[in-house]
Image: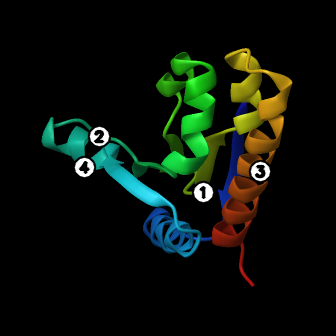
Amino acid sequence: MNGLISIQSNFDPTETVKRLEAEMKRHGMTVFARIDHAALANEAGLPLLPTVLIIFGDPKVGTPLMQANQLIGIDLPLKFLVWQDPAGRTWLAYNDPEWLTDRHGLAADLNQITAGMADALTAMARKVTSIR
């Protein structure tokens, strides 16, 4: 899918979310919200495999992008989605920040910011999904 990065986790959804939130704290990121889609679906009487959305970020990093084009606010703060597929595999997905630059037509001088965001997200995603 264009602009979406998905990585299979070696852990179940609960452990992946736990590891992810701990890693975000280590990086000084703020978790703004955690939405448990499966729990909400269950409350509505509907089945849904584990699916958790974590909305997070750092205003010091995201604000310059919004100053350049406020419409990127539809994609900020950033999000991680942790979900389990029907085969029982756990996945972690997020939007590629460099793709967001293109999507919102941000000037090339902001590429350094989004490249740094992309590197940080990739490193975090790999760390929390792999066994070391």
Left or right of residue 93, residue 48 in this image: left
Is the C-beta separation of discs 1 and 4 under 8 Å? no
Location of residue 56 in the rendering, given as x and y in whole percent from the top left corner:
47, 50
Mark 1 vs mark 4, foreground winner is: 4
Query: Where residue 47 is drawn, which disc sits there?
Result: 2
Mark 3 secondary-structure assignment: helix
> Of the residues shown, which amino acid type is indicated by label 3?
Gly
Q: Which residue is mark 1?
A: 89
Whole-angstrom CA distance, mark 3 to mark 1, is 29 Å
- Front-most of residues 59 and 130: 59
The mark that comes first in sequence, 1 or 4, is 4
Q: Which residue is found at the position 68% from the left and 60% from the top?
A: 125
Distance between mark 4 and mark 2 Cα atoms: 9 Å
- Could you tell me which quadrant the C terminus lies in? bottom right
**Residue for badge 4:** 39
> Which residue, as the protein is rendered here, is positioned at the far bottom?
132
Q: What amino acid type is highlighted by mark number 2?
A: Pro
Locate residue 49, reporting x and y percent.
Answer: 40, 47
In space, the residues marked 1 and 4 are separated at their CA atoms by 19 Å
